[in-house]
Amino acid sequence: MSRKRKELPTLEGVEISAVAAEGNSIARVDDKVVFIPYGAPGDKVTVKIDRKKSRYSEGHIVEIEQPSTIRIAPLCEHFGTCGGCKWQHLPYEFQLECKQQQVIDALERIAKVELPEISPILGSERIWEYRNKMEYTFSNKKWLTFEQLRSGEEFPKRDAAGFHISGAFDKVLDINRCWLQDDISNRIRNFIKRFGIEHGYSFYDLKAQHGFLRTLMIRISSTGGIMAVMVFGEADELKISELLGAVENEFPEITSLLYVINTKVNDTIGDQEILIRKGKPYIEEEMEGLKFRVGAKSFYQTNSRQAYELYKVAREFADLTGKELVYDLYTGTGTIANFVARKAHKVIGIEYVEDAIADAKLNSEVNGIGNTLFYAGDMKDVLTDEFVREHGVPDVMIVDPPRAGMHEDVVDVIKRAKPRRIVYVSCNPATQARDLALLDELYRVTRVQPVDMFPHTQHVENVVRLDLRD
Protein backbone atom coordinates (compact mmCIF):
# COMPACT_ATOMS: atom_id res chain seq x y z
CA MET A 1 0.00 0.00 0.00
CA SER A 2 1.50 3.34 -1.01
CA ARG A 3 2.04 6.06 1.56
CA LYS A 4 -0.32 8.99 1.42
CA ARG A 5 1.43 12.09 0.18
CA LYS A 6 1.75 14.76 2.85
CA GLU A 7 -0.31 17.85 2.12
CA LEU A 8 2.00 20.82 1.59
CA PRO A 9 1.15 24.02 3.47
CA THR A 10 -0.38 27.32 2.43
CA LEU A 11 1.55 30.23 3.92
CA GLU A 12 0.13 33.67 4.64
CA GLY A 13 1.97 36.97 4.94
CA VAL A 14 4.92 35.92 2.79
CA GLU A 15 6.96 38.90 1.57
CA ILE A 16 8.66 38.78 -1.83
CA SER A 17 12.21 40.10 -1.48
CA ALA A 18 13.76 39.88 -4.98
CA VAL A 19 13.56 38.44 -8.48
CA ALA A 20 15.41 35.26 -9.37
CA ALA A 21 16.41 33.02 -12.27
CA GLU A 22 13.88 31.65 -14.75
CA GLY A 23 11.54 34.59 -14.17
CA ASN A 24 10.75 33.59 -10.58
CA SER A 25 10.75 35.75 -7.48
CA ILE A 26 12.23 34.92 -4.07
CA ALA A 27 10.89 34.91 -0.54
CA ARG A 28 12.42 33.58 2.66
CA VAL A 29 10.37 31.51 5.09
CA ASP A 30 12.02 30.06 8.20
CA ASP A 31 15.43 30.84 6.71
CA LYS A 32 14.69 28.82 3.57
CA VAL A 33 14.30 30.17 0.06
CA VAL A 34 10.93 29.88 -1.66
CA PHE A 35 10.78 30.38 -5.44
CA ILE A 36 7.49 31.92 -6.59
CA PRO A 37 6.56 32.93 -10.16
CA TYR A 38 4.86 36.26 -10.92
CA GLY A 39 5.89 37.96 -7.69
CA ALA A 40 7.19 41.53 -7.36
CA PRO A 41 9.68 42.62 -4.70
CA GLY A 42 7.63 44.13 -1.86
CA ASP A 43 4.52 42.01 -2.49
CA LYS A 44 2.93 40.47 0.60
CA VAL A 45 1.23 37.25 -0.56
CA THR A 46 -0.43 34.01 0.40
CA VAL A 47 1.57 31.15 -1.13
CA LYS A 48 0.66 27.51 -1.70
CA ILE A 49 3.78 25.34 -1.50
CA ASP A 50 3.87 22.95 -4.48
CA ARG A 51 7.24 21.34 -3.98
CA LYS A 52 9.49 21.06 -0.94
CA LYS A 53 13.20 20.24 -0.99
CA SER A 54 15.75 20.24 1.81
CA ARG A 55 17.27 23.58 0.75
CA TYR A 56 14.37 25.33 -0.97
CA SER A 57 10.67 25.20 -1.82
CA GLU A 58 8.57 26.15 -4.83
CA GLY A 59 5.09 27.60 -4.69
CA HIS A 60 2.50 29.77 -6.37
CA ILE A 61 0.61 32.88 -5.32
CA VAL A 62 -2.91 32.18 -4.09
CA GLU A 63 -3.66 35.78 -3.14
CA ILE A 64 -1.86 39.10 -3.22
CA GLU A 65 -2.55 40.43 0.27
CA GLN A 66 -0.73 43.71 -0.33
CA PRO A 67 0.77 44.54 -3.73
CA SER A 68 4.24 45.98 -4.05
CA THR A 69 4.51 49.68 -4.81
CA ILE A 70 6.37 48.78 -8.03
CA ARG A 71 3.80 46.24 -9.27
CA ILE A 72 1.94 47.33 -12.41
CA ALA A 73 -1.05 45.85 -14.23
CA PRO A 74 0.08 43.39 -16.94
CA LEU A 75 -1.08 44.27 -20.44
CA CYS A 76 -1.80 40.73 -21.62
CA GLU A 77 -5.01 38.90 -20.72
CA HIS A 78 -3.09 35.61 -20.72
CA PHE A 79 -0.49 36.75 -18.16
CA GLY A 80 0.04 34.17 -15.44
CA THR A 81 -1.18 31.27 -17.57
CA CYS A 82 0.84 31.56 -20.77
CA GLY A 83 4.18 31.84 -18.97
CA GLY A 84 5.92 33.51 -21.91
CA CYS A 85 6.33 37.01 -20.41
CA LYS A 86 6.79 36.48 -16.69
CA TRP A 87 7.87 40.07 -15.97
CA GLN A 88 4.92 41.98 -17.43
CA HIS A 89 3.91 43.05 -13.92
CA LEU A 90 7.27 44.79 -13.41
CA PRO A 91 8.03 48.28 -14.80
CA TYR A 92 10.41 48.09 -17.74
CA GLU A 93 13.06 50.22 -16.03
CA PHE A 94 13.06 47.77 -13.13
CA GLN A 95 13.34 44.85 -15.56
CA LEU A 96 16.47 46.47 -16.97
CA GLU A 97 17.94 46.89 -13.47
CA CYS A 98 17.36 43.19 -12.80
CA LYS A 99 19.00 42.17 -16.08
CA GLN A 100 21.98 44.42 -15.43
CA GLN A 101 22.40 42.77 -12.02
CA GLN A 102 22.04 39.33 -13.59
CA VAL A 103 25.05 40.06 -15.80
CA ILE A 104 27.06 41.50 -12.91
CA ASP A 105 26.30 38.51 -10.68
CA ALA A 106 27.28 35.99 -13.37
CA LEU A 107 30.57 37.68 -14.18
CA GLU A 108 31.53 38.29 -10.55
CA ARG A 109 30.38 35.02 -9.01
CA ILE A 110 31.10 32.55 -11.81
CA ALA A 111 33.87 34.08 -13.92
CA LYS A 112 35.70 35.64 -10.95
CA VAL A 113 37.97 37.55 -13.31
CA GLU A 114 39.12 41.14 -13.22
CA LEU A 115 36.40 43.29 -14.75
CA PRO A 116 36.17 46.84 -16.11
CA GLU A 117 33.18 49.00 -15.24
CA ILE A 118 30.13 47.33 -16.78
CA SER A 119 28.26 49.65 -19.11
CA PRO A 120 24.56 50.37 -18.47
CA ILE A 121 22.29 47.95 -20.29
CA LEU A 122 20.89 49.00 -23.66
CA GLY A 123 17.12 48.82 -23.36
CA SER A 124 14.82 47.97 -26.24
CA GLU A 125 13.20 50.96 -27.96
CA ARG A 126 10.02 48.92 -28.38
CA ILE A 127 8.79 46.77 -25.51
CA TRP A 128 5.62 45.52 -27.26
CA GLU A 129 5.19 44.04 -30.74
CA TYR A 130 8.97 43.77 -31.02
CA ARG A 131 9.29 40.16 -32.24
CA ASN A 132 9.72 39.42 -35.93
CA LYS A 133 8.90 35.73 -35.52
CA MET A 134 6.16 33.84 -33.66
CA GLU A 135 5.23 30.16 -33.75
CA TYR A 136 1.80 28.84 -32.81
CA THR A 137 0.46 25.32 -32.33
CA PHE A 138 -2.99 23.98 -33.24
CA SER A 139 -4.33 21.39 -30.83
CA ASN A 140 -7.55 19.51 -30.06
CA LYS A 141 -6.65 19.59 -26.35
CA LYS A 142 -7.14 23.19 -25.27
CA TRP A 143 -5.74 23.94 -21.83
CA LEU A 144 -8.53 24.85 -19.41
CA THR A 145 -7.68 27.62 -16.96
CA PHE A 146 -8.62 27.44 -13.28
CA GLU A 147 -11.38 29.99 -13.96
CA GLN A 148 -12.84 27.82 -16.72
CA LEU A 149 -12.72 24.70 -14.56
CA ARG A 150 -14.38 26.48 -11.63
CA SER A 151 -17.12 27.88 -13.88
CA GLY A 152 -18.78 24.47 -14.19
CA GLU A 153 -19.20 25.09 -17.92
CA GLU A 154 -18.80 22.14 -20.29
CA PHE A 155 -16.11 22.34 -22.99
CA PRO A 156 -16.87 19.52 -25.44
CA LYS A 157 -14.89 21.20 -28.25
CA ARG A 158 -11.38 22.03 -27.17
CA ASP A 159 -9.75 23.12 -30.43
CA ALA A 160 -7.10 25.76 -29.80
CA ALA A 161 -4.40 27.81 -31.51
CA GLY A 162 -1.70 29.21 -29.28
CA PHE A 163 1.25 28.19 -27.10
CA HIS A 164 2.28 24.98 -25.39
CA ILE A 165 1.73 24.84 -21.65
CA SER A 166 4.97 24.29 -19.74
CA GLY A 167 5.09 20.76 -18.38
CA ALA A 168 2.13 19.57 -20.48
CA PHE A 169 3.40 19.02 -24.03
CA ASP A 170 0.03 17.88 -25.34
CA LYS A 171 -1.92 20.90 -24.00
CA VAL A 172 -2.09 24.26 -25.76
CA LEU A 173 -3.31 27.55 -24.31
CA ASP A 174 -5.76 29.17 -26.74
CA ILE A 175 -4.47 32.69 -27.36
CA ASN A 176 -6.77 35.58 -28.17
CA ARG A 177 -4.14 38.30 -28.44
CA CYS A 178 -0.38 38.15 -27.98
CA TRP A 179 1.34 41.53 -27.63
CA LEU A 180 4.79 40.39 -28.74
CA GLN A 181 4.22 40.76 -32.49
CA ASP A 182 2.25 43.12 -34.71
CA ASP A 183 -1.49 42.48 -34.34
CA ILE A 184 -1.75 41.07 -37.87
CA SER A 185 -0.17 37.95 -36.39
CA ASN A 186 -3.17 37.55 -34.07
CA ARG A 187 -5.61 38.23 -36.86
CA ILE A 188 -4.05 35.60 -39.15
CA ARG A 189 -3.94 32.96 -36.40
CA ASN A 190 -7.50 33.60 -35.23
CA PHE A 191 -8.80 33.61 -38.81
CA ILE A 192 -7.24 30.21 -39.52
CA LYS A 193 -8.61 28.82 -36.25
CA ARG A 194 -12.15 30.05 -37.03
CA PHE A 195 -11.96 28.82 -40.62
CA GLY A 196 -10.79 25.41 -39.44
CA ILE A 197 -13.61 25.09 -36.90
CA GLU A 198 -16.26 26.29 -39.38
CA HIS A 199 -15.10 23.81 -42.04
CA GLY A 200 -14.69 20.87 -39.68
CA TYR A 201 -10.92 20.55 -40.05
CA SER A 202 -9.23 18.39 -37.43
CA PHE A 203 -6.84 20.14 -35.06
CA TYR A 204 -3.65 18.23 -34.28
CA ASP A 205 -3.69 15.63 -31.51
CA LEU A 206 -0.24 15.92 -29.97
CA LYS A 207 -0.44 12.56 -28.20
CA ALA A 208 -1.95 10.49 -31.01
CA GLN A 209 0.15 12.37 -33.62
CA HIS A 210 -2.53 13.05 -36.18
CA GLY A 211 -4.70 15.93 -37.40
CA PHE A 212 -4.85 18.42 -40.25
CA LEU A 213 -4.00 21.84 -38.73
CA ARG A 214 -0.62 21.51 -37.02
CA THR A 215 1.49 24.68 -36.60
CA LEU A 216 1.79 28.23 -37.93
CA MET A 217 4.86 30.46 -38.12
CA ILE A 218 4.61 34.17 -38.86
CA ARG A 219 7.58 36.39 -39.66
CA ILE A 220 7.29 40.15 -40.04
CA SER A 221 10.35 42.03 -41.28
CA SER A 222 11.37 45.59 -40.53
CA THR A 223 11.08 46.30 -44.27
CA GLY A 224 7.38 45.40 -44.33
CA GLY A 225 7.49 41.80 -45.52
CA ILE A 226 5.04 39.34 -43.95
CA MET A 227 5.63 35.60 -44.16
CA ALA A 228 3.08 33.00 -43.04
CA VAL A 229 4.15 29.35 -43.00
CA MET A 230 1.26 26.95 -42.42
CA VAL A 231 2.19 23.39 -41.43
CA PHE A 232 -0.32 20.62 -42.12
CA GLY A 233 -0.26 17.18 -40.54
CA GLU A 234 -2.12 15.59 -43.46
CA ALA A 235 -1.57 15.80 -47.22
CA ASP A 236 -5.14 16.76 -48.10
CA GLU A 237 -4.53 18.99 -51.15
CA LEU A 238 -8.18 20.07 -51.45
CA LYS A 239 -8.36 21.32 -47.86
CA ILE A 240 -4.91 22.89 -48.12
CA SER A 241 -5.91 24.83 -51.24
CA GLU A 242 -9.21 25.85 -49.67
CA LEU A 243 -7.58 27.20 -46.50
CA LEU A 244 -4.63 28.93 -48.16
CA GLY A 245 -6.94 30.51 -50.73
CA ALA A 246 -9.04 31.95 -47.91
CA VAL A 247 -5.95 33.28 -46.12
CA GLU A 248 -4.66 34.81 -49.36
CA ASN A 249 -7.96 36.60 -49.96
CA GLU A 250 -8.34 37.78 -46.36
CA PHE A 251 -4.76 39.03 -45.99
CA PRO A 252 -3.46 40.43 -49.28
CA GLU A 253 -0.62 42.09 -47.30
CA ILE A 254 1.07 38.69 -46.81
CA THR A 255 4.08 38.76 -49.14
CA SER A 256 5.19 35.13 -48.65
CA LEU A 257 2.49 32.51 -48.11
CA LEU A 258 4.22 29.16 -47.68
CA TYR A 259 3.21 25.73 -46.44
CA VAL A 260 4.66 22.42 -45.29
CA ILE A 261 3.17 18.94 -45.11
CA ASN A 262 4.73 17.39 -41.99
CA THR A 263 3.58 13.86 -41.14
CA LYS A 264 6.53 12.92 -38.93
CA VAL A 265 6.45 12.79 -35.13
CA ASN A 266 8.14 16.10 -34.24
CA ASP A 267 7.21 19.65 -35.25
CA THR A 268 10.58 20.72 -36.68
CA ILE A 269 10.50 21.69 -40.36
CA GLY A 270 14.26 21.89 -40.95
CA ASP A 271 14.16 18.64 -42.90
CA GLN A 272 10.86 19.37 -44.67
CA GLU A 273 10.14 20.81 -48.14
CA ILE A 274 8.85 24.38 -48.11
CA LEU A 275 6.09 24.82 -50.68
CA ILE A 276 5.05 28.21 -52.09
CA ARG A 277 1.45 29.33 -52.40
CA LYS A 278 2.18 33.01 -53.03
CA GLY A 279 5.18 35.32 -53.26
CA LYS A 280 8.87 34.66 -52.69
CA PRO A 281 10.33 32.02 -50.37
CA TYR A 282 11.87 34.74 -48.21
CA ILE A 283 11.40 38.17 -46.71
CA GLU A 284 14.16 40.73 -46.24
CA GLU A 285 15.67 42.51 -43.27
CA GLU A 286 17.87 45.57 -43.74
CA MET A 287 20.75 47.09 -41.77
CA GLU A 288 22.78 50.07 -42.99
CA GLY A 289 21.86 49.32 -46.59
CA LEU A 290 22.70 45.61 -46.27
CA LYS A 291 19.86 43.24 -47.12
CA PHE A 292 19.45 39.91 -45.39
CA ARG A 293 17.17 37.29 -46.88
CA VAL A 294 15.23 35.37 -44.24
CA GLY A 295 13.53 32.13 -45.29
CA ALA A 296 11.21 29.80 -43.41
CA LYS A 297 14.16 27.85 -42.00
CA SER A 298 16.52 30.79 -41.44
CA PHE A 299 17.76 31.93 -38.07
CA TYR A 300 17.55 35.66 -37.51
CA GLN A 301 17.52 37.55 -34.22
CA THR A 302 13.86 37.85 -33.28
CA ASN A 303 14.04 41.53 -32.26
CA SER A 304 15.18 43.18 -35.51
CA ARG A 305 15.66 46.71 -34.19
CA GLN A 306 17.55 45.59 -31.12
CA ALA A 307 19.63 43.14 -33.17
CA TYR A 308 21.01 46.17 -34.99
CA GLU A 309 22.06 47.69 -31.66
CA LEU A 310 23.65 44.38 -30.61
CA TYR A 311 25.62 44.07 -33.84
CA LYS A 312 26.80 47.66 -33.61
CA VAL A 313 28.22 46.90 -30.16
CA ALA A 314 29.96 43.77 -31.50
CA ARG A 315 31.45 45.75 -34.39
CA GLU A 316 32.60 48.55 -32.09
CA PHE A 317 34.25 46.06 -29.72
CA ALA A 318 35.98 44.35 -32.69
CA ASP A 319 37.68 47.71 -33.44
CA LEU A 320 38.43 46.83 -37.06
CA THR A 321 40.69 48.90 -39.34
CA GLY A 322 40.15 47.04 -42.62
CA LYS A 323 43.29 44.92 -42.34
CA GLU A 324 42.09 42.18 -40.03
CA LEU A 325 41.34 38.50 -40.61
CA VAL A 326 38.15 37.84 -38.62
CA TYR A 327 36.71 34.49 -37.58
CA ASP A 328 32.98 34.58 -36.86
CA LEU A 329 32.16 31.46 -34.86
CA TYR A 330 28.54 30.25 -34.68
CA THR A 331 27.83 32.61 -37.56
CA GLY A 332 24.24 31.44 -38.18
CA THR A 333 23.09 33.02 -41.45
CA GLY A 334 26.19 35.22 -41.48
CA THR A 335 24.49 38.37 -40.22
CA ILE A 336 27.40 39.53 -38.05
CA ALA A 337 29.97 38.31 -40.58
CA ASN A 338 28.42 40.32 -43.39
CA PHE A 339 27.75 43.27 -41.08
CA VAL A 340 31.45 43.65 -40.19
CA ALA A 341 32.90 42.56 -43.56
CA ARG A 342 33.16 46.12 -44.90
CA LYS A 343 35.60 46.97 -42.11
CA ALA A 344 37.70 43.79 -42.33
CA HIS A 345 40.17 42.31 -44.81
CA LYS A 346 38.48 38.92 -44.67
CA VAL A 347 35.80 37.21 -42.58
CA ILE A 348 35.49 33.44 -42.13
CA GLY A 349 32.22 32.18 -40.67
CA ILE A 350 31.60 28.73 -39.19
CA GLU A 351 28.18 27.30 -38.35
CA TYR A 352 26.71 23.85 -37.63
CA VAL A 353 23.53 24.21 -39.74
CA GLU A 354 24.17 23.74 -43.47
CA ASP A 355 21.00 25.62 -44.50
CA ALA A 356 22.18 28.61 -42.44
CA ILE A 357 25.53 28.58 -44.21
CA ALA A 358 23.72 28.53 -47.56
CA ASP A 359 21.82 31.65 -46.40
CA ALA A 360 25.07 33.27 -45.25
CA LYS A 361 26.68 32.77 -48.66
CA LEU A 362 23.54 34.06 -50.38
CA ASN A 363 23.48 37.17 -48.17
CA SER A 364 27.10 37.92 -49.10
CA GLU A 365 26.26 37.50 -52.77
CA VAL A 366 23.11 39.66 -52.59
CA ASN A 367 25.07 42.48 -50.96
CA GLY A 368 28.09 42.22 -53.26
CA ILE A 369 30.37 41.19 -50.40
CA GLY A 370 33.37 39.29 -51.73
CA ASN A 371 35.59 38.96 -48.67
CA THR A 372 33.67 36.27 -46.75
CA LEU A 373 34.07 32.50 -46.58
CA PHE A 374 31.64 30.17 -44.81
CA TYR A 375 32.01 26.61 -43.56
CA ALA A 376 29.38 24.23 -42.20
CA GLY A 377 29.98 21.63 -39.51
CA ASP A 378 30.19 21.00 -35.79
CA MET A 379 32.33 23.81 -34.36
CA LYS A 380 34.70 21.53 -32.46
CA ASP A 381 35.25 19.46 -35.62
CA VAL A 382 35.71 22.37 -38.04
CA LEU A 383 37.69 24.80 -35.88
CA THR A 384 40.90 22.84 -35.42
CA ASP A 385 44.58 23.75 -35.31
CA GLU A 386 44.84 22.51 -38.89
CA PHE A 387 41.97 24.81 -39.96
CA VAL A 388 43.78 27.78 -38.39
CA ARG A 389 47.05 26.86 -40.11
CA GLU A 390 45.26 26.57 -43.46
CA HIS A 391 43.22 29.77 -43.24
CA GLY A 392 45.48 31.94 -41.11
CA VAL A 393 45.61 33.01 -37.49
CA PRO A 394 42.72 35.42 -36.91
CA ASP A 395 43.37 38.91 -35.64
CA VAL A 396 39.86 39.05 -34.20
CA MET A 397 37.38 36.36 -33.24
CA ILE A 398 33.68 37.05 -32.83
CA VAL A 399 31.86 34.23 -31.03
CA ASP A 400 28.09 33.98 -30.57
CA PRO A 401 27.47 30.47 -29.21
CA PRO A 402 24.16 28.87 -28.17
CA ARG A 403 23.00 29.01 -24.53
CA ALA A 404 25.30 26.14 -23.57
CA GLY A 405 28.34 28.26 -24.39
CA MET A 406 31.51 27.00 -26.09
CA HIS A 407 32.80 23.43 -26.04
CA GLU A 408 36.12 23.12 -24.18
CA ASP A 409 37.81 21.85 -27.36
CA VAL A 410 36.80 25.11 -29.09
CA VAL A 411 38.16 27.16 -26.19
CA ASP A 412 41.44 25.24 -26.39
CA VAL A 413 41.83 25.96 -30.13
CA ILE A 414 41.13 29.65 -29.50
CA LYS A 415 43.79 29.73 -26.79
CA ARG A 416 46.35 28.13 -29.09
CA ALA A 417 45.44 30.46 -31.98
CA LYS A 418 45.77 33.52 -29.72
CA PRO A 419 43.78 36.12 -31.70
CA ARG A 420 44.57 39.63 -30.49
CA ARG A 421 40.95 40.28 -29.63
CA ILE A 422 37.81 38.27 -28.92
CA VAL A 423 34.27 39.64 -29.00
CA TYR A 424 31.99 37.26 -27.10
CA VAL A 425 28.25 37.72 -27.73
CA SER A 426 26.14 35.64 -25.35
CA CYS A 427 22.48 34.90 -24.67
CA ASN A 428 23.42 33.25 -21.36
CA PRO A 429 25.71 35.27 -19.03
CA ALA A 430 26.25 32.21 -16.82
CA THR A 431 27.88 30.06 -19.51
CA GLN A 432 29.65 33.13 -20.88
CA ALA A 433 31.15 33.69 -17.42
CA ARG A 434 32.32 30.06 -17.30
CA ASP A 435 34.07 30.49 -20.66
CA LEU A 436 35.66 33.79 -19.58
CA ALA A 437 37.23 31.97 -16.64
CA LEU A 438 38.75 29.43 -19.05
CA LEU A 439 40.20 32.24 -21.17
CA ASP A 440 41.46 34.33 -18.25
CA GLU A 441 45.05 33.05 -18.31
CA LEU A 442 45.53 34.58 -21.76
CA TYR A 443 42.88 37.30 -22.00
CA ARG A 444 41.66 40.20 -19.92
CA VAL A 445 38.12 41.54 -20.11
CA THR A 446 38.20 45.17 -21.28
CA ARG A 447 34.58 45.98 -22.19
CA VAL A 448 31.19 44.67 -21.06
CA GLN A 449 27.85 45.73 -22.59
CA PRO A 450 24.53 44.09 -21.66
CA VAL A 451 21.73 44.37 -24.24
CA ASP A 452 18.04 43.64 -23.68
CA MET A 453 16.56 41.77 -26.62
CA PHE A 454 13.45 40.39 -24.91
CA PRO A 455 11.41 42.81 -22.76
CA HIS A 456 9.13 41.22 -20.13
CA THR A 457 11.29 38.09 -19.94
CA GLN A 458 14.31 37.30 -17.76
CA HIS A 459 16.57 36.76 -20.79
CA VAL A 460 19.48 39.13 -21.44
CA GLU A 461 22.27 39.30 -24.02
CA ASN A 462 25.76 40.36 -23.06
CA VAL A 463 28.74 41.42 -25.20
CA VAL A 464 32.27 41.17 -23.80
CA ARG A 465 35.53 42.29 -25.35
CA LEU A 466 38.68 40.35 -24.42
CA ASP A 467 42.20 41.50 -25.27
CA LEU A 468 45.28 39.29 -25.35
CA ARG A 469 47.44 39.89 -22.31
CA ASP A 470 50.86 41.45 -22.87
Image (tube, grey):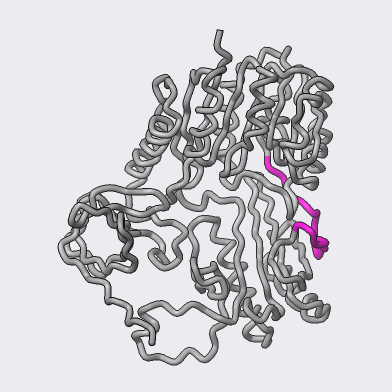
State the image quarter where residue 363 is shown.
top right
Q: Nearer the viewer, residue 429 or 123?
A: 429
State the image quarter where residue 405 is shown.
top right
Counting from the top left corner in percent of width and height, residue 113 is at 44, 23
Asked if 190 appears above or below 89 in the picture, the reply is below
Inspect the magenta stretch and tell me whether residue 279 lies in it.
Answer: yes
Q: Nearer the viewer, residue 186 or 120?
A: 120
Residue at horizontal 67%, vertical 73%?
214
Q: How many marks?
A: 0
Taking 298 as reference, is 444 left or right? left
Q: Nearer the viewer, residue 205 or 67?
A: 205
Counting from the top left corner in percent of width and height, residue 23 is at 39, 53
Asked if 294 appears above or below 195 in the picture, the reply is above
Q: Which residues are magenta?
A: 270-285
Query: Considering the image in quadrants, where does the C terminus appear?
Result: top right
Residue at horizontal 55%, vertical 36%?
426
Counting from the top left corner in percent of width and height, residue 250 is at 67, 70
Asked if 241 appears above or below 416 in the picture, the reply is below
| One can see residue 68 in this view | no
